[in-house]
Image: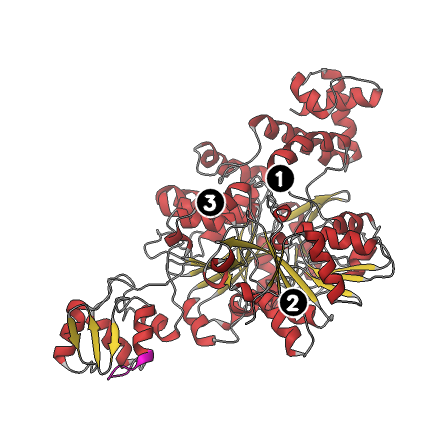
Amino acid sequence: MKAPIVIESIDACVDYILDTVPDTVVFGIPLGIGKPNPLVNALYRRIKANPARKMRIITALSLERPVGHSDLEKNFLLPLVERVFGDYPDMDYVKDFRAGQLPTNIEVQEFFMKTGDYLGNASAQMGYISTNYTYAARDMAVQGLNVIAQAVGAKGQDGSLRLSLSSNPDITEEVIECVRATGQPVLAIGVINQKMPFMPNGAEVSPGFFDVILTDPVATHDLFAPPNNKVSPADYAIGLHASSLVTDGGTLQIGIGSLGDAIGQALIVRDRHSAEYRHILDALCPTGLDGRELGRFDVGLYGCSEMFVNAFLRLIEAGIIRREVFDDAVLQQLINTGRIKEDCVTPDTLQALLEAGRIRSPLADEDVVFLKRFGIFRAEVQLSGQHLVFETHRCGLDLREATCVECIGSHMLGSRLAHGVFMTGGFFLGPRDFYERLRTMASQDLAKIDMTRIDFINQLYGNDALKRAQRRKARFMNTTMVITLLGATASDALESGQVVSGVGGQYNFVAMSHALADARLIMMLRSTHDNKDGLKSSIVWNYGHVTIPRHLRDVVITEYGMAELRGRSDGEVVKRLIAIADSRFQDELVEQAKEHGKLEASYEVPECFRHNLPEVLAAKLKPWSEAGLLPDFPFGTDLTDDELHMVRAMKKMKHASHHPSELLTMAVKSLWEGKEAPPAYLERLGLAEVHSFKDRVMRRLFAGNL
């Protein structure tokens, strides 16, 4: 592996790219925070200014600092964004892409878009690449990728320089492998951002992995850090139901956002407040708690998720994510059966490995390397000819000889297995304190987190035995937007074909859940959604787009309960989904199912499921919210108390803006009551002075909703 070229300025790096690639630059950059924004901007501006050059950007999840839509939102967000996002530089192509103003010589293609941001954007919709996450590297490579650049973490300098792919080891290595396998060259550029957490294990690469390393200090900037979302009663109810399906000693996959936080907090409540946890579930489950897991986590969980999110880190800190897995199939299988204990190495450990055929007797070089790697032998043990040597102790290699085993057991064994990990992730994204906790985490704790390739995480193919051994009792938790009464889900796009986000890894985890004998797929959704067309049920008879077909249905959860669908008949699936639908839509769903011959004419929804209403749910959870077990922000927030107060008022106003009659009623009431907001709030929102009737109405509306 040849030494990389070190370039010290962004402009010089752009020059090098344009000199190396004389034709169209097909530019691959990672999803999320792994993008080297300053380099991306410099290259984009240079090509934008020169119509003779062309570029295609191939990426996913391009992030932009929030700006707000209305004047009220913009004024509110300005100081918040400055405080939370710091010097994070927006990317020029994102602004042009969003505004529909990309120059004709530049294209952007994404395989996963920031949720809902590009609905109605013709360029984005036409440029979207629909692919599973495990195929993303392949599908990027077939575009003729010739440059790939990534922000990296760094330690040391010059000859001691160490690099980490940090947040994004997900597909970079695989993309480069795929392109080079075709015989085509690809220029790999590592851009050092000193604020990227340095992640070890699968994320660490040698400097020679890159053709170019860019060391310009301008490339160091704050990371995109979305604040934690408020966890609503509906989110908590979903999270509580989901948490009761997680088995101690199992494997967990969850996603970002308020649902992920709700699951994380519910698991913490289950572990630390088991009696209260049972009482909460009793209130939420009208048919009882059969089949629910209610106990503490005595063994702990292993986290295995394409996205390493804040909730996972909180579960690590709470001691719930702690089940270690090891990078050897036979060793892991012996741990699973209890034949080997992770925390106690004994001569019996050697015997178990010998009986399983993982090591031989007499021991060979590779056996000693294996035993030292996993801490079974002390690191100082050496193989010298036909003997093992440690300090003044010396013995033979035959594990069937009692004197050899006695010597090894007395002097050469480690105390516990080494190099286990309890969290495996492909990329991460989180609030500011999430990154800071990773940057400052003790090295021995950080070593338990393995950021690695998505082709390892999201599928069983390749090293199948190891993955199956590690991912025991897996619970793969995914969110969807809409589910049909027959169990098909739409998670990435609307029935019009407009893409909301992307398929991402959802299908991969669905497939794994059915391929692993003791795994379950848990598909979560809020029972309703509200928009300008009014309140709609998220459980529908039919939908014109499908992400996951109905034959892959398993467990579905809404805030009103859990529906076990695996192996059930269509008629039973329909009944179970109606039972967890919002009660305002149940009669309509029953009639539709009857009309299509999927429910008997005499069927009626049982009385115990007839009270699926937001106010009923809120009342059930209120005592536990007031007791502090279900706080609005279980893992903290970057917003101040005043900002939270203001946000609640503005959300009410925004909701009313989609419903004219509600807005009119709200406006009349606010004007009649004549309430005033605190001067500091009005100053923040640009409402301190009234210049028009509109200003007066907005001021009164805001005050009336505080």
For label 2, the SS is helix
User: N-terminal of the two: label 1 or label 3?
Assistant: 1
Within 10 angstroms of label 2, few (less than 14), some, or many (20 or more) residues? many
In-image side of 622 versus 108 (left or right): left
Q: Is 531 situated above or below 6?
A: above
Quadrant of the drawing holding the C terminus:
top right
Magenta span contains residue 38: no
Q: Nearer the viewer, mark 3 or mark 2?
A: 3
Tag 2: amino acid: Ala
Q: Which residue is mark 1?
A: 85
| Residue 685 seen in the figure | yes
Q: Which residue is mark 3?
A: 437
Tag 1: amino acid: Phe
Where's residue 328, x and y in %?
Answer: 39, 72
Q: Are marks 1 and 3 in contact (CB under 8 Å)?
A: no
Query: At x 70% / y 21%, what residue is drawn?
Result: 682
Q: Are marks 3 and 2 in contact (CB under 8 Å)?
A: no
Where's residue 488, x and y in %?
Answer: 65, 63
Q: Is 114 situated above or below 573?
A: above
Mark 3 to mark 2 CA distance (whole Å): 30 Å
Q: Which residue is mark 2?
A: 136
Quadrant in the picture for residue 139: bottom right
| Residue 545 seen in the figure | no
In-image side of 255 versus 125 (left or right): left
